[in-house]
Image (tube, rainbow, N blue to C red):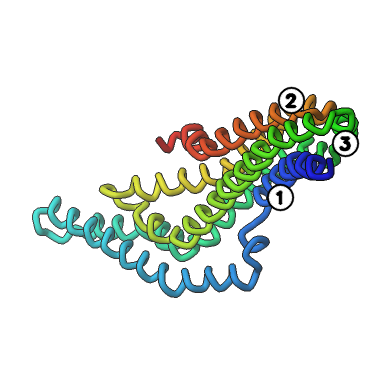
Amino acid sequence: MKGIAGLVDGIFGNINWMLSNITDVVTKTPADILGKDYWNGLLKIGTIAVLPFAIIILSYCMAAELYRVYCRSNGALDLELVCTTFVKFILPYFIVIKSYDLIQWIYRMFNSLITTIYSSLTIGGINAIDTSALDKQLQGLSFFDKIGSLLEIWPLWVAVKLLSVIIIVIIYGRLFEIIILWIFSPIPLATLASDDIGRIGKNFIKLFCAAMLQGAVMLLCAALYVCLVKKAVIEPSIGGAFTMLGYSAVLAATLAVSGSLSKRILGTF
């Protein structure tokens, strides 16, 4: 009996833990997850290693543009066109130099949206699940019925454990994607002024915004999940546990496609 009760508590407890991690990680910054010192160290590495490479790319784009100006003027020095070309690259130069500040601004803007959505939704309202009804149901079973219930619940407990791992991997995968995009942001931003490869920088901005918007999509998925499992939480039973497993599988599936969904919203695809 204690073994069955422990498995039941583990099922509902893992679902609560999984839901809590979704809301907790999505609303935190890389500095909160990695530690402020470590995150500042990563940004310093980016400034030392990535930023100079981005300036080289920007210089190449400017040289290619000057060459086109030279060809359009038939080899004659057109001072107006040359000056216009240099002016064209002044703003992209400052964007590259201040790329981490720009990414920080975009992050804060979307994180404010995520925080507002989180504060407006009731996501953590099922943390205390009363399984007393299920305990009474199990107490009334015979010994062999309890063995049958144990064999029925154990695979369910394993499945919920696996789903919890999958969901946490998806959530932290988004966080790692944001960090990688953040660190290497100067490189694609250096292409913004180029007529040939400028779409790389524009697509990068869309991609980073989509990664941030994915957090809001995840929170909405978690809120919808809470609505679905409310009945199973209020009246816990073996059938309700299986229902929650099905809903958890739906949650895992929707979280898995949340990234592509946010990209479609911003027209990245």
Which residue position is annotated with label 2? 239
Q: Nearer the viewer, mark 2 or mark 3?
A: 2
Which of the numbered marks, if any, corresponds to residue 141? none
Where residue 200 appears, as percent x and y from the top left, is: 35, 48
Frontmost residue, 134 versus 210: 134
Q: Single out the residue that lies furthest toward the left.
A: 74
Local packing at callout 3 (Cα closer than 10 Å; few below 14, some 14-19, many 20+) is some
Q: Earlier in the sequence, mark 1 or mark 3?
A: 1
Local packing at callout 1 (Cα closer than 10 Å; few below 14, some 14-19, many 20+) is few
Task: Kindly identify the residue that appears in the image at 66 percent across and 51 percent down.
Answer: 25
Q: Nearer the viewer, mark 2 or mark 1?
A: 2
Q: Earlier in the sequence, mark 2 or mark 3?
A: 3
Which residue position is annotated with label 1? 24
Where residue 232 appears, as percent x and y from the top left, is: 78, 27
Q: Single out the residue that lies furthest toward the front.
A: 144
Amino acid, disc 3? Asp
Frontmost residue, 101 versus 12: 12
Q: Distance between the residues labelled 1 and 3?
A: 23 Å
Task: Kindly identify the residue that appears in the image at 56 percent across and 46 percent down.
Answer: 170
